[in-house]
Image (cartoon, grey):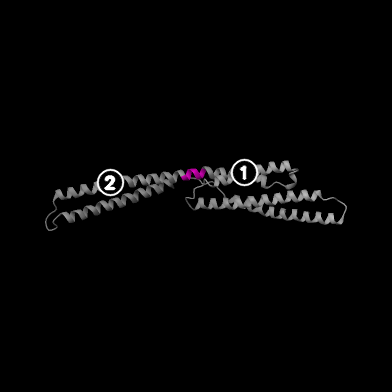
Amino acid sequence: MGKKELKDKIELTIFWLGLFCLSYLILGIILKSDLTSPLDSSIFYEVFRDSLTLTAYFLAPIAALILFTDWREQHASINNEKNSKEILDVATNLLPYINTYYLEIQNDEQFFKFREQYFTLYFDLKRKKLLINSIDSKSEEFVNNIEKLDIVILEIWSCLERQYQFNKLYESVPEGSSSSEILKRSYGDKINEAGIKKSDCLSNYLKIQKKLSVLHV
């Protein structure tokens, strides 16, 4: 793809420079010669030499610009391939965390350690997303999907944290009274609500993840 685009640019440059050279040659001959008499070879040579010199003068910077632009685009594409693959790895590594059941976290020490690991991966995903160059529709779509994934990851964490905190409150309520049962039921409902939302978020996460693919050069 990149080689074809470079070839097209070179061919287009040659065409326009050739057209410029020919136009300069024709116009120069018209202006310098007497059209009622045969063409003077010295005039033709002079105009032809000037047209080639001027064309060559424009050719060097244009060629340099084309090659530099192509190199920059190629470098951006290679960078996208590398970082998109790393992003996919992070998204896969996040799956065990976003799929964690709140009862698997048994105390605050585990909770804080889990939160640190969770957000280490999350911020790694955000950092790598910033390294993606939006150079075409495919890379723009990739970045857009990562932004959606970003929101879902935070929503999943919010649900998991609510489940954990409300479960602590649920377990702290003493048994044996009607008010305790009402309170437990209230906390249980909140845990279930967060669980339903978390399941929906997890489903969205998997749908978005399926849309992601390495941005091959």
Tell me where the magenta segment starts and ends, as one range. Answer: 76-81
Q: Is residue 119 above or below residue 180?
A: above
Q: Is residue 80 magenta?
A: yes
Residue 159's spot in the image, x, y percent?
Answer: 69, 52
Which is more toward the observer, 167 or 15? 167
Which is more toward the observer, 80 or 61? 61
Return the disc, 1 or 2, that comes first in the chain's sequence. 2
- CA distance separating discs 1 and 2: 53 Å
Q: The disc labelled 2 sits on which kind of residue?
A: Tyr
Which residue corresponds to the image point at 71% horizontal and 43% vertical from the top-left? 111
Which residue corresponds to the image point at 21% horizontal and 47% vertical from the top-left? 49
Q: Is 44 left, or right, of 123 in this rendering?
A: left
Q: State yes or no: discs 1 and 2 in contact (Cβ < 8 Å).
A: no
Q: Main secondary structure of the magenta part?
A: helix
The residue pinned by badge 2 equals: 57
Which is more toward the observer, 147 or 166? 166
The residue pinned by badge 1 equals: 121
The part of the image, by quadrant, that contains residue 107 is: top right
Is residue 91 among the parts visible in the rendering?
no
Residue 27's spot in the image, x, y percent?
Answer: 21, 55
Farthest residue, direction left:
37
Which residue corresponds to the image point at 18% horizontal and 54% vertical from the top-left? 29
Which residue corresponds to the image point at 25% horizontal and 51% vertical from the top-left? 21
Say few, some or many: other residues with alpha carbon within 10 Å of mark 1 (under 14 / 14 to 19 / 20 or more): some
Residue 57's spot in the image, x, y percent?
Answer: 28, 46
Q: Is 58 left, or right, of 197 in this rendering?
A: left
Q: The disc labelled 1 sits on which kind of residue?
A: Leu
Q: Secondary structure at mark 1?
A: helix
Q: Is residue 67 magenta?
A: no
